[in-house]
Image: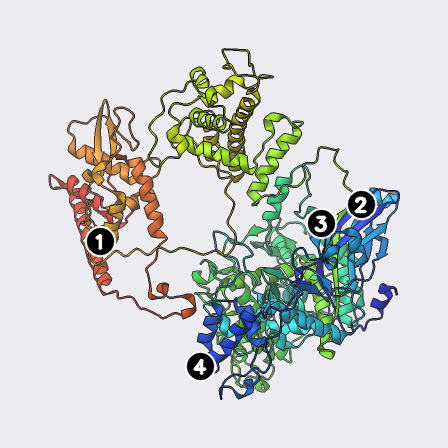
Amino acid sequence: MPDPAVDIQQLLPEYPIALLPVRIETRFVAGPPHELLVRVYPDEIAAELGHLLTSDAAEAAREFWRQAWDPANELDAWRRILRRYPAHVAAGLIEDNEPDNLVTRPTGEPVWADPPAAPSPQTATTRVLPDCWIVVGYRGGSEVLRFTGSAIVEPLALSFRRDIAEGAPELVDHDGLAVEPALLWTVDFDAAVTAGMGMRIPIEQDELDNGFDRLIVYGVKTTLNAADAQARLRALLANHRKTRGLALVRQGTPTNNSSEGTSGYPPPDDAERSFAIERGAPLAGADSDGAALAKALGIDVEAFDHVEGADRFEQDRARAMNQALWPCTLGYYLEQMMSVRPGVQPLITPGTIDAIRTHFIRFVRGRGPLPAFRIGNVPYGILPVTPLANGVEPLDIALAQRLVQWQPHMLARLGGVARVGKTPSEPDADLLGILAVDASAREARLREVMGPAYVRAALQLLGMAPDLDALARAALVADALNKAGLDGTPRVATMTFAKDARRINRPLVTADPLSEDQPLADNYIAEIGSAQSIDLLDPPVPSPVMHARPLLYHLLKHGALVEYGRIAVGLDPAATDADRREVELFHIAPGTLNRLSPRQRYAAPLPSLTNGAPLGTWLLTLPEQPEDDNGRGPVRAHLAALATLENVPTAELERLLTETLDVCSHRLDAWNTSLAAWRLDERRSDNATGVYLGAYAFVENLRRRTAPLPGTAGGFIHAPSATHAAAAALLRNAYLTRNRAEEVAFDLSSRRVRRALALLEGVRQGQPAGAVLGYWFERAMHDRGLDRYIAPFRRMYPIDRIPDAPVEAPSEQIAARNVVHGLALRDTLFGLPAIPWSDATKMPVVTSADRPGVETCLRLLEEDVDAAADLLAAESVYQVVRGNTDRAAANLASMAGTGSLPSPGIVESPTSGLSFTHRVAIVLGTAPASSPWSTTRPRCVAEPRLDGWVGRLLGDPDAIRCRAIHGASTTVVTMQELGLGAIDFVVLAQRTGPDGGELSARVISYVQATVAGITDPITVDFGRPSEPPWPASVDSFEEALETARLVGELVRGARPLGGNDLRMPHDGGVSHAPDTAEMDARVTASLTRFADVRGELDAAIADAASPTPQPNSLDVLRTALWTAPDFGVRGAKPV
């Protein structure tokens, strides 16, 4: 076949190559001959699913058209079809089965002349893979390997056909697996080589020993021109949209479910949402994310008209943040810090700075220049790449040169990046390092800087010597600039920097919790954008509130001031280069006596321009039409950027801020990508559509691993969850590291687990393990016709009296009343080399003919005990892996015979499939339920129905007790005596700590008031006493508090029941406003009572503090203080 590398070089450079990801597997084979085996598997993105239009689906689609023929009924018809199919599948079925007379809708009825298309026999194929694979290996930065594989079969089958039944003659056998010939490549390597998906690559001894630093597998479909490849890519995306689902993914979308929220897939849908996406107006408008993605891929924008997320403007927001922050970040640095003294040739010309500004705003993105998307539940990103040296424009070439110069310095720091394998001896530390890394900066630091004029003035004032360190720093900076191709001494080289950078202790964007859908509550962005004068934007005396605002506010305000100042100087025809250079000390440093400060410049009019108005006011007063701006176009552009940002959700604002700061700091990769994005944009300007197709994969640090010694490899273990797999790995490791010792040989096969569970369940029901085992032993003897030996075994191994079994207990528990003590029998024979048939103290007399049967029963008995031991040991390890050490300890205690037997969790498989949530509605009624608890307390009066329901859950307060210990005496106090309400107790349960808190204080106060003559300190014990024991009908405070905590969690997690809760999701929502009149009355009454309590407390305090207090003033004050906590005033208790 022709050299594919040559074919790739002959492709038209006007069109990019879309490289889809694939998965590769590699293996070194020691010869002779030595080989590297490479196997390629397509990614899901390359798979095209077969036709889904079965006869039932076609009928559902046609029924949709019948119901929706009147457009007014289309939403209801959409809701009905969603009951059977996901939204993206339903949309595909509807589009693929449109009536022949759709243009006449709604006149007449829908008509189909042809029957539905038959389902495709192919379930999954791919037609977008390269013509062949090219494998390139690198070591030490040099290419050391190149190999070209065979031609790839097209179309390549990826799954079983629908029309081949099990046992069909065309199936072939491969290691016991029957597969169709077209799929043999997936399981047989030689077949994969023939299909072009596998490669046997000859290698030398050096390559076998040293491997490769990087192995790249790639290819391009050069047999398709750009137009045909574009059509095939378009068809692939359309297939994804109708089968797996295609959507653009919002930045910040969670990829996993967590305690903070659910993942972004599947998206929530109330039918109206998906209807607007799939059946509504086209989403991919001008400058939208969908349009940007379509432009980059070289396909028509209509491909994203009905793709979720195509109507977002995330790239527009990123562009706006770049523009808003440019003046106070890179713009300020290039214009001020990289400036030189007036009269000296500038290091960076103003024209170059303007070009960099334009490039930064348009193409530099911390999140990448194109939106992410998903196929099914798999997210993908698109990253433009290009050789840096392929620039044409002067700025392109200059940026590429600088990036190439800086790249070695960045790559030298890669060794410190957190990654797996960074510290082989400490994998846990590597994992924690990875988990601690975020996508962008989480904090900002401030380093104070003093300019040379200030330093000289300060040194002269103090009579000190010149700053010699500054001269040394200037030499270092000059050397660094020379290496970067810049010759001169910029202003930054003369600065004096503080030693440390301190953290800016203020929020990045807002002090409120970040939101994915709500903008700033204190919308300072709108405030900055709407300022009509410089003084409003930057008051001469800033208020403390402005100073304490988040970092983004200060950056945006400073950016606006710098931008307006730059524009103001540019509009002044008398301004010089010196005026563009920021002054450190006005009217103090030489040459600044006649310079205008920014405020002076803003306050003065420009006679030729502002018609007598102050320049600052004129700048911010824009005419309606842009053509009348008269030099204020940059102001309009800056204000437009602020307007784009002012309604952005706060979480997205923080991402945009930190991403922009990152690309101004250390994100060299974003600048590399920006050049590729620029070049792609230029090519798309001339060739809007057209693309080539290819695929790629790579692996780094590919080395041959030494094969394990024979017999030491544990092999693979299939487990239902990651936790099960980790527990299995620990158990197998114990077995392997102890040379397969029998005591760590765990067998959790299905039969053994079932027997062990039955034994544990019998013990949990109150039966001794020996009795259950004895019953099983006797049943085995009976099944083998050996009943005559049961009585001798019972006499030799009798069992103690067995407690009564419940009526519903299993038969073996009820029958096990006079049985062999199975555990004693097993323990007697355990460890013996053989059964002692002749020892009358251990075995009854058994004939030689019956001995094999009895021996089988004894072996089954040993297996049952061993199975239970294996299960309990494995359960302990499983609970340790889960981090549940209490449960693991309980299992170990049960094995030692000192604890109850918990139900093993290791045998429970995690559920799969569609998840759903059960919601329980509690109807409290119109009248409060009767309750033995106090119902007159403030919380109870405020919510009487809830109080009554909670009281029923908690039970009788007279049966909830604690003990107050004072000296040698003990006083029992009930909850009834404390006089608390049910809700009061639930609230106290959430606050009660080890010291008892407010509840303990109430008990002490009650005892002091009711028991006379107490002089000893009072200690409160919430637990249940051992002597004398309380009856089972009585709960201790400790037990009741745990119940109350659970009730509190239930109440806190509840919400009012609304009308929409009783509707099906596809029925749509109807707003129901609650009737709050009765509730408002209760709230008003509670507030009135609280005001009365406050007045009583004020009066009691005043009386107690007066020179002539009432005789009972302290008792009145104590009573008033105990009333305050009932209203939620924490800490208001007498001491």
Instruction: Write the residue at 29% across / 45% down.
Output: 986
Residue situated in front as seen by the camera: 865 or 433: 865
Q: Give the number of the mark in front: 2 or 1.
A: 2
Residue placed under numbered mark 2 in the picture: 28
Q: Give the number of the mark in front: 3 or 2.
A: 2
89, above or below 912, in the image: below
Image location (x, y in percent) of residue 699 = 74, 52
So how many labels did they put on this image?
Answer: 4
Q: Earlier in the sequence, mark 1 or mark 3?
A: 3
Residue 944, labelled with which disc? 1
Marks 2 and 4, how far apart at CA: 65 Å
Q: Answer few, some or many: residues within 10 Å of disc 3's Cα (few below 14, many 20 plus, some between 14 and 19).
A: few
Marks 4 and 3, how far apart at CA: 63 Å
Marks 1 and 3, how far apart at CA: 65 Å
Residue placed under numbered mark 3 in the picture: 413
Instruction: Write the residue at 79% across / 49% down.
Output: 213
Tell me the kind of residue under disc 3.
Answer: Arg
Image location (x, y in percent) of residue 554 = 52, 63
Query: Residue 286: which quarter of the image?
Result: bottom right
Q: Answer few, some or many: residues within 10 Å of disc 4's Cα (few below 14, many 20 plus, some between 14 and 19).
A: few
> Could you tell whether 739 is left or right of 989 in the image?
right
Residue 72, labelled with which disc? 4
Residue situated in front as seen by the camera: 207 or 929: 929
Image location (x, y in percent) of residue 350 = 70, 72
Q: Is residue 681 visible?
A: no
